Amino acid sequence: MAVYTEVRFEEAAALLHELDLGDLTELQGIQGGIENTNYFVSSEREGQTLRHVLTVFERLGFEQLPFYLHLMRHLAGRGIPVPGPAANAGGEILHRIQDKPAAVVDRLRGRSELRPGVAHCEAVGAMLARMHLAGLDFEMRQDNLRGLAWWNETVPVVLPFLDQAQSRLILGELAYQNHVASSSAHKALPRGPIHADLFRDNVMFEDGELTGFFDFYFAGCDSFLFDIAVCLNDWCVRHGEPEVDGLPVPELADRFLAAYESVRPLTAAEHQLMPAMLRAGALRFWISRLWDLHLPREASMLKPHDPSHFERVLRARVPQSAAAHVLPELAPA
């Protein structure tokens, strides 16, 4: 949500007119995040104030984006609270600004809950399960572009920036995850479209009620368990001083999973591989944050996330996995 592309007021106004969203009254760049250019846009139509988010995509191309936008439209049609993309008179939901792909989606009510309690975790767990079930009949398919193949490509790129202990950890964990991916248990995991980035700042609440999931631009087809693990590694861990940062909060994790399973019970393979997928989720975001920190792109308002948080999450998850005796034929990293 950094600003890489400076969108002019008249450009945004013309797009809103094309989408029959009225006259643009406000265009405000959104701070935070690192992938795309995002603006809050407000407009007036027939005396009504409309609020949307304009996204200009900086890495994803015109060939990849239909998956994300049509997935959001599909989920919204199944009753999942996600931002619906705005279409023009021809029904197109993927647009163009400065020769880059762009979209305009509904702005959700409320705010993100960065210090979640039990009720927030239960609400997210149940809605995540509903989302997984709602996506089962979505016909488009696209791999998780930040999955194992990307980890294998990116680790050698970030390795020169790591000390010896970090290098041992990241290489050992990458070998472990390649091994897990080749196992029969992993191949048995239920799959479908997943969000893959459902952190606390990608969920909205208003008056304690979950009002929506957003920022689906890391979504892809992968195991539902990986999606669950990504959530558990953000919603159900400590955030704060280094001595506690990244440590699991078992009560929050238990309540999150109980709420999820009240909608979609986990399979035997999912229970077996939960510890390994928690490690996978931590590895994925440690790699991406290392990449963003050490190989940054220029952007207004850009503030890369600290990679050390997910290094700590991973270090906390490795002993848990070893204690659970998951795939013991491969020693933990």
Image (spheres, helix red, strand yellow):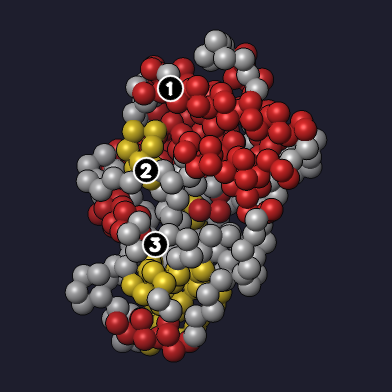
Q: Residues within 10 Å of mark 1 (few under 14, many from 20)?
A: few
The structure residue drawn at horizontal position 68% and vertical position 29%, both measured from the top left corner, is 169
Under mark 1, the amino acid is: Ser
Kindly identify which residue carries mark 2: 143
Secondary element at image label 1 = loop
Residue 61 tag number: 3
Cα separation between marks 1 and 2: 17 Å
Instruction: Tell me if residue 286 comes above or below residue 28 in the rendering.
Output: above
- In the image, 320: left or right of 61? right
Of residues 282 and 287, the one nearer the viewer is 287
The structure residue drawn at horizontal position 52% and vertical position 75%, both measured from the top left corner, is 5
The structure residue drawn at horizontal position 32% and vertical position 59%, both measured from the top left corner, is 63
Under mark 2, the amino acid is: Asp
Residue 213 tag number: none
- What is the residue that sits farthest to the left in this orientation? 90
Instruction: Tell me if residue 87 comes above or below residue 174 in the rendering.
Output: below
Q: Are marks 1 and 2 in contact (CB under 8 Å)?
A: no
Rendering coords of residue 193 (x, y %): 34, 42
Of residues 249 and 158, the one nearer the viewer is 158
Cα separation between marks 3 and 1: 30 Å
Cα separation between marks 2 and 3: 15 Å
How many marks the image carries: the answer is 3
**The N terminus lies in quadrant:** bottom right
Rendering coords of residue 48 (x, y %): 36, 82
Q: Are marks 2 and 3 in contact (CB under 8 Å)?
A: no
Under mark 3, the amino acid is: Gly
Rendering coords of residue 121 (x, y %): 52, 39
- In the image, 286: left or right of 5? right
Of residues 78 and 151, the one nearer the viewer is 151
Q: Earlier in the sequence, mark 2 or mark 3?
A: 3
Of residues 312 and 134, the one nearer the viewer is 312
The structure residue drawn at horizontal position 70% and vertical position 49%, both measured from the top left corner, is 306
